Image (spheres, coloured by chain):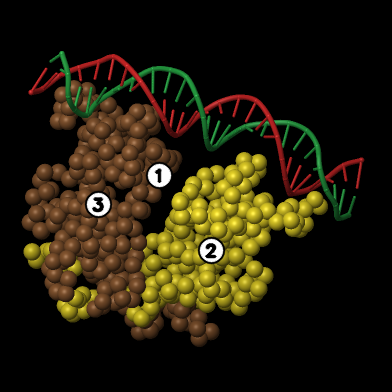
Chain colours: A brown, B yellow, C red, D green
Amino acid sequence: MNRINNHLPNLVSPKVYHSAEQSILHSVDCVILGFQGTELHVLLIRFPYDPFRGHWSLIGGFVKPELNIDEAARITVETMTGLSNVYMEQVHTFGDLDRVPSERVITTSYFALIRIEPTLVSLTKTFDATWFPVSKVPLLVYDHSFMLNKALSDLRRKIRFQPMGFELLPEKFTMTELRNLYQSVFGRELEKRNFTRKVMQMGILKKLTEKDKATSKKGSFLFCLNKKNYQVLLDKGFLFDM
Amino acid sequence: MNRINNHLPNLVSPKVYHSAEQSILHSVDCVILGFQGTELHVLLIRFPYDPFRGHWSLIGGFVKPELNIDEAARITVETMTGLSNVYMEQVHTFGDLDRVPSERVITTSYFALIRIEPTLVSLTKTFDATWFPVSKVPLLVYDHSFMLNKALSDLRRKIRFQPMGFELLPEKFTMTELRNLYQSVFGRELEKRNFTRKVMQMGILKKLTEKDKATSKKGSFLFCLNKKNYQVLLDKGFLFDM
DNA sequence: ACAAAAGTGTTTCTATTACACCCATGG
DNA sequence: CCATGGGTGTAATAGAAACACTTTTGT
């Protein structure tokens, strides 16, 4: 029974917790993803202190005892981008002993999906942050490269059950933009016709009368999400298999 | 820049970490799942201290600073079941402020998939642990009910990409047992013939000459995993869509 | 001989793929 | 008038679903 008291401390009365157990530093790191051109991008900063000064890093922060971890992650993203109501999801908690050489730190990672707007670009510049295409990300500090990969593979899996892709696009978007996004996430080409058909028959897109003439002379129709239908589909669960 | 120093402490040199930041209690809780009869079961203990004395609880433990979190979870499961080499996976980290009323505790949950063997049943009894069918789980302490549900829904999603089901069955099992397991996980009936055909054409099962006569007079053939083929299939990724 | 579970084949239908041509427009 | 990207229909194929009967054997 000695062993169980060591390892199953739920068996220890709350009053005893603090005296018996030691606490640990906890941080959050955010994989902030946005979509630009034909590729998914991630927001990175330069780590400003030795011994990793100048190396690229995800954006994170420590969790203060009076802050919810999800909230800590949200504040990190808000601080960096100036955006609220960002779509975020917890990915994984990294708890290896030597992941941060100088300290024992447990870190929970999140991904955040944001629409890259012109205003945003300048904001992130004040923080010396840079958008990297996910296919061209440099080596990152600590285990951040691993974190990023885990976040991306989680995104690829989850986006099939819950098309978060729309979180990455502006309100109005063309079918080509949507397809480029999914191509970038999945890392492979998607057939134009079949893609359009599948998306349309889900009934979650509203075709607008407006056209976007930025990329062709003919112009391509803009779409927006039919939020009601989208919610219905989310609730009953669906496969966005492409 | 004051704000960024508060919320983006990666910008703070490692040397400053400890003095600037406060640490938090971190625990792990394990959703130990096993399969018995026709239903998935979860292992619960009675919480032995006030104010939650006698309420049912998942099995957990605090993470000591010198212990990896995955390892902490593994030790918890080993202590409880006497089993090593258990299939475990991290599910989620719960960091709300008031989830444990008396303390600030951040908890990472795991699921563990184990084969319920006769020897095991007696071992867990010494710890006053009880197996509950997942459809008949009582209300649990703290946010453990929520944790359990999250683990189960994660399992349901993940088991389609990586048939962890085999972790829950003995070495040799009948097709009916396998089907019962998947029915219990998915919570719906699966057509006998189509199920058999799909599983067989994956080529990951070896049909033995042996029969199990426990459940019928005719007897049903036993199968075991063809581990080589299974690994190949895992590596290239596959959908266990039923 | 019958009850109880195991095991097996075929048809129907739906969904996915693969494929090639016309459209609209700005330059 | 032509180059460029936008947009659409159809046929072939593969996979999923639905279905009912035969087998074995202990009692």
Chain ID for label 3?
A: A
The mark that comes first in sequence, 3 or 1, is 3
Whether labels 2 and 1 belong to a single chain: the reply is no
Q: Residue at x 34, y 71 (%)?
A: A95
Q: Are marks 3 and 1 on the same chain?
A: yes
Amino acid at pointer 3: Val
* Residue B68 sits in quarter: bottom left
C-alpha gap between disc 2 and disc 3: 34 Å
Which class describes the residues within 10 Å of circle 2: few (<14), some (14-19), or many (20+)?
many
On residue B166, which mark appears? none
10 Å neighbourhood of mark 3: few (<14), some, or many (≥20)?
A: some
Taking the image as shown, residue B239 lies to the left or right of residue A201, namely right
Q: Which residue is mark 1?
A: A161
- Which residue is label 2 attached to? B113
Q: Position of residue A74 (x, y in %)?
A: 23, 57
Q: Circle 2 sits in a helix, a strand or a loop, which is it?
A: strand
At a point 61% along the width and 76% down the height, the residue shown is B123
- The image quarter in which residue C19 lies: top left
Residue placed most toward the observer, A229 or A211? A211
Q: Residue at x 27, y 32 (%)?
A: A175
Q: Which residue is mark 3?
A: A134
Which amino acid, by three-letter code, is at mark 1? Phe
Q: Where does the image place residue A148, in percent across and percent down from the top left?
A: 28, 58
Q: Please identify the quadrant where the C terminus of chain B is shown.
A: top right
Nearest to viewer (mark 3 / mark 1) = 3
| Pointer 2 chain | B
Q: Which of the pair C27/A94 is nearer the observer? A: C27
Task: Identify whether B187 is placed above or below D3.
Answer: below
Quadrant of the snapshot with the N terminus of chain B: bottom left
Measure the alpha-carbon separation of dots 3 and 1. 22 Å
| Residue B84 place in picture, x, y as percent | 54, 73
